[in-house]
Every structure is written in structure tokens, then in C-alpha cells.
Image: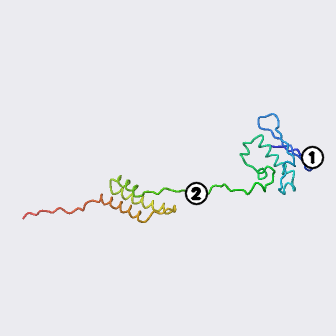
């Protein structure tokens, strides 16, 4: 924990911030003068010791444990003369939750042609039919619907391949009856 000792009055008011890093024998200290730290923020007038303590803690941490601060700064630290008005407005750099990415078009006809070549029976074609139906639904849900003519072309390809495996009609053998 950090300890704070205040002394002086007015612009000569200062704080000594002391803290010991684990494993070390003596305290590390920083001194901050009110006149050097104060900004136009109204809280410096209302609670100067509190603001001086906050500022002193930041100075101590930046000097002795900068990894704790991880590059985080208070608004008062942006401008060299501590006047926030010169720092400009804050900019939100939070990434958008859904970044629009250009996606290359999917060649469904080529994909399904290759899949259907792998089918060795009607059951495989039936499975491809179900998978194509799922693909259409997923594309729709993702806001990237597949063109109707592409949907129909793939369904036709699956039906044609399925027909390749249809069993030929069995006709009853003609019986030759003795005369």
C-alpha cells in the first residue's frame, strides 16, 4: 500500500507518496507539488488533497511500477500544460462488434459437383440433398442468401445424380408356356 504525507499550504501544498515493493528493504518515494499537478477540473478546488493523492499515486506507479499502469492515462495527463481543452475530444477506439468483411463469392456449383462425384450410391445423394438444404438455410440466416437459380441448379444436379443410382424397373420375366 502507498502512504501519503502532506505538507504546505496553497500552491506550495505537496504530497510525499511512499511505497515499498515486495522484496525490497526501503520505501520508494515521490514528491508532487499542488501547483505542478492542479488542472482546471473543479475537484482540484473542492478536494485538493484527494486529487493530489490520486496524482501522486499515478506518478509513483509510473516511476516505480510502470507495468501496473499499462499505458493508461487520466484525462489530465494528455496535455503538457494540464489544460484538458487542448487535448481534444476523446475518440472511441472500441472495435465494432460486427465488422463487415468482404467475402469472396462461393462457387456452389463447383463444390456440389465435386461432392456428388464422390457419391457411390443413392443414400449419399440423399445426404447431399439434406446438406444442401442446410447450406441454403445457413446462408439465409447469415444474411447472405444464395440466388434462387443457384439453389435450383444444385437441387437439379443432386436429383440427376440420384437418378443414376435408381434401380432399373424390374419387369417380370416372360414365362414361356408350353404349347
Q: Secondary structure at mark 1?
A: loop
Q: Secondary structure at mark 2?
A: loop
State the residue position of label 2: 99
The location of residue 88, given as percent across then percent down, is: 74, 56
Query: Residue pushed farthest right?
Result: 9
Query: Residue pushed farthest left?
Result: 179
Instruction: Point out the image quarter for the C terminus.
Output: bottom left
Q: Residue drawn at (52%, 63%), measured in percent from left and top?
A: 143
Instruction: Point out the image quarter for the N terminus.
Output: top right
- Marks counted in the figure total 2
Of label 2 and label 1, which has the lower sequence position? 1
Determine whether label 2 and label 1 are within 8 Å by CB: no
Q: Is residue 45 above or below residue 64?
A: below
Q: Residue drawn at (78%, 34%), measured in percent from left and top?
A: 24
The location of residue 6, given as percent across then percent down, is: 89, 46
Which residue occupies the foreground of this view, 62 or 76? Answer: 76
Q: Is residue 104 above or below residue 63?
A: below
Q: Label 2: how many residues lie within 10 Å, few (<14), some (14-19) or many (20+)? A: few
The residues tagged by marks 2 and 1 sit, at their Cα atoms, a distance apart of 55 Å
The location of residue 140, given as percent across then percent down, is: 49, 63
State the residue position of label 1: 8
Q: Label 1: how many residues lie within 10 Å, few (<14), some (14-19) or many (20+)? A: few
Amino acid at each position: 500500500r502507498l502512504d501519503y504525507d502532506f505538507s504546505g499550504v496553497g500552491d506550495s501544498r505537496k504530497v510525499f507518496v511512499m511505497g515499498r515493493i515486495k522484496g525490497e528493504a526501503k520505501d520508494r518515494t515521490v514528491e508532487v507539488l499542488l501547483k505542478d499537478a492542479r488542472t482546471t477540473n473543479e475537484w482540484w478546488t473542492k478536494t485538493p488533497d484527494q486529487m493530489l493523492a490520486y496524482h501522486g499515486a499515478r506518478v509513483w506507479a509510473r516511476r516505480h511500477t510502470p507495468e501496473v499502469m499499462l499505458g493508461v492515462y487520466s484525462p489530465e495527463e494528455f496535455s503538457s500544460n494540464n489544460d484538458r481543452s487542448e487535448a481534444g475530444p476523446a475518440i472511441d477506439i472500441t472495435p465494432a462488434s460486427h465488422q463487415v468483411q468482404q467475402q469472396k463469392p462461393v462457387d456452389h456449383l463447383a463444390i456440389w459437383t465435386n461432392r456428388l462425384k464422390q457419391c457411390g450410391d443413392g443414400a449419399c445423394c440423399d445426404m447431399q440433398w439434406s446438406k444442401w438444404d442446410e447450406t441454403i438455410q445457413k446462408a439465409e440466416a447469415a444474411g447472405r442468401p444464395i440466388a434462387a437459380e443457384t439453389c435450383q441448379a444444385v437441387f437439379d444436379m443432386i436429383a440427376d445424380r440420384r437418378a443414376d443410382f435408381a434401380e432399373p424397373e424390374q419387369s417380370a420375366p416372360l414365362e414361356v408356356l408350353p404349347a
